[in-house]
Image (cartoon, rainbow, N blue to C red):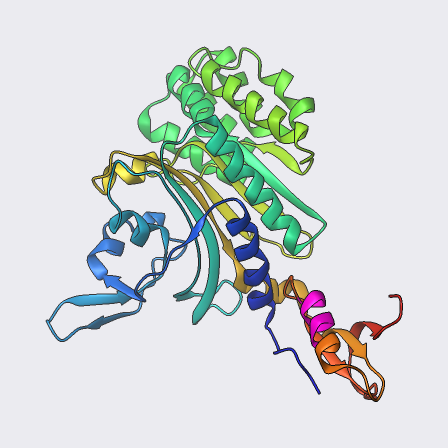
Amino acid sequence: MNLQPVFTPDERAAFKLRALYRSRGYRPYNMSKFEEYDLYVRNKDFLVSDNVITFTDTNGRLMALKPDVTLSIIKNGTDGTDEKVYYTENVYRVSKGTRSFKEIMQAGLECIGTVDDYQILEVLTLAAESLRSVSDRSVLDVSHLGIVSAVLEESGLSRASAKEILSFLGEKNLHGALEVCAREEIAPNAAQAIKTLFTTYGAPAEVLPALEGISQGGKEALDQLKRLTEALNAAGIDTVRIDFSVINHMSYYNGIVFRGFVEGIPTGILSGGQYDNLMKKLGRKDSAIGFAVYLDLLEDLLEGEEYDTDTVLLYPEGADPAALAKRVAELSADGERVSALRTLPEKLTYRRVIRFGEEE
């Protein structure tokens, strides 16, 4: 008898993430599966993919199956109230894995209203812990757009050339950036500052000293980055790396931005940052920071390693049903799949076996 339902990888991850976010005082946010298509057309650069499934409702309005959650939360909120919400919602967009439209489970959280250093620290902490709940081998790459924008502004580059540099920065294409600097004949110290953005990567304590004096206008942003990374380190989070190639879209984002990776998946499974610019674009005055976890990518992580169940709990004839049910609940409290069985099937695959009533 299997007392535990079968969860897919994304469902098990979502279970853990919901528990994590609730433990920090975030409340669940539920919403409609669709919004007016115009919301996504006006903000298509903010979306992971600009491919959207549309339909016409009974009132003649062009609607879209929701490809993003953050836009809906902002649109349906009001200024002046601090909100801390989390979600595990299905979105509808082209999957990175299949390259076709798919219903994708996405988890994440948003902190809207007053966003001070503590709120940013809390969100960064939850991002790192979200990655750790997926894999013990993870890294959270953090950047600060205040530093990037200050370096570019002080370089004397034209707007078009600065845009080129940003594109190259996201690609980590230093050669292309240096060609732009040479073409624009910018000052050597400005070119060196830009080069530093490209070559700076690693643990904060190791690389932050190299950023001293990189930009006069970016000093406040650099000080904030130092405070936050020092606080993360003091909290025992040692998976943070500085990486200025994490830039996101600067028309929407500002300040701290970040991206999370786990071993075994070639692309980021978590993305987020401060998005005050998006709030303003949608007519909001509040500040905001948040992130999303792309749970569909976990299929790549578990490919070839999936088991029929995580734990087999073998119990003898005459075992107390109430005690057995309690033990199953304890083992499955974090989303682990538990099969309570009298005997071990020959073809069943599993991670471990526990005998009911005995030490594990």
- Is 174 placed above or below 226 here? below
Percent position of residue 247, x then y: 46, 36
Location of residue 154 (image quadrant): top left
- Is 276 placed above or below 178 here? below
Percent position of residue 226, x then y: 57, 21
Residue 314 part of the magenta-drawn span: no
In the rendered structure, the answer to whether residue 297 lies left or right of residue 150 reads right
Residue 327 part of the magenta-drawn span: yes
The residues colored magenta run 325-332
- Is 66 placed above or below 22 here? below
Q: Main secondary structure of the magenta part?
A: helix
Location of residue 33 (image quadrant): bottom left
Location of residue 345 (image quadrant): bottom right
Give the quarter of the figure containing the N terminus. Answer: bottom right
Nearest the viewer among 270 and 286 is 286
Nearest the viewer among 58 and 110 is 110
Percent position of residue 76, x then y: 25, 51
In the rendered structure, the answer to whether residue 247 lies left or right of residue 160 reads right
Residue at (60% x, 73% y) in the render: 7
Nearest the viewer among 239 and 27 is 27
Residue at (62% x, 54% y) in the render: 266
In the rendered structure, the answer to whether residue 242 lies left or right of residue 144 reads right
Residue at (57% x, 51% y) in the render: 20
Task: Give the farthest residue toward the left.
Answer: 59
Residue at (65% x, 61% y) in the render: 334
